[in-house]
Amino acid sequence: SLVLVVAGALFVWQHANPPAIAPVLAAVTSDAQRSGPSMRLALVRGVDSAPELQRGFVRVEIVGLFDPGFHYTVSLDRLEQQKNVETIGTLYSQHPTSPITLEVMIDSDRLRAGAYSLRVRKQASGEEPLDFGFLKP
């Protein structure tokens, strides 16, 4: 009976305290994150190919015109061939790093291969969102 009690206690303890799961999309919080792999996304007319996301944790630098006095929402969406959109993650209240740069982190190892989009919206604004596409090979 002692073995059953100990086994039951271990089972409950393991299932009551699941391991922390890191998010797929996160804010850049330290200078160390700025030194690793990175990708720059900008709206460029006439470009036919989408940039490819590297493996691991990648700092994504989104280039646009940002107002440092506002908060922005960044959504990561997976684009399906049937025009379905699956939202993978959303960050709220993000501040631009500068008037032209907003940075986020993506854990590309947790993404399936395919086409993705980062959608950036100015909170409390009726402005159109900015969409930046990329591929996960």
Image (cartoon, helix red, strand yellow):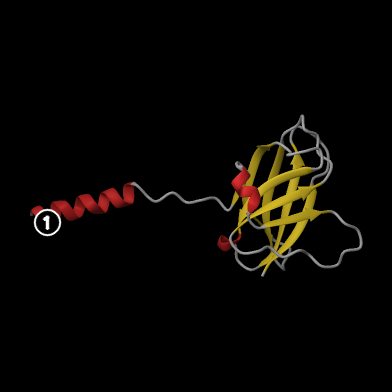
Q: Position of residue 114 (x, y in %)?
A: 67, 67
Is 97 left, or right, of 100 in this rendering? left
In this rendering, the answer to whether 94 lies above or below 35 is above
The image position of residue 22, as x and y in percent, is 51, 51
Given the current orientation, which residue lies at the most extreme left position?
1
- Residue 93 is situated, as x and y percent measured from the top left of the image, at 67, 35
| Residue, disc 1 | 3
Question: How many marks overall?
Answer: 1
Q: Quadrant of residue 55?
A: bottom right
The residue at the point 76 percent across, 59 percent down is 133
Badge 1 crowding class, 10 Å Cα cut-off, few under 14, some 14 to 19, many 20 or more, is few
Q: Quadrant of the N terminus?
A: bottom left
Tag 1: amino acid: Val
Indicate the secondary structure of the residue bearing disc 1.
helix
Q: Which residue is at the front of the view, 88 or 81?
A: 88
Residue beneath the point at 64% across and 46% down: 90
Q: Is residue 33 left or right of residue 83?
A: left
Residue 109 at what x, y percent from top left? 57, 63
The residue closer to the viewer here, 52 or 37, is 37
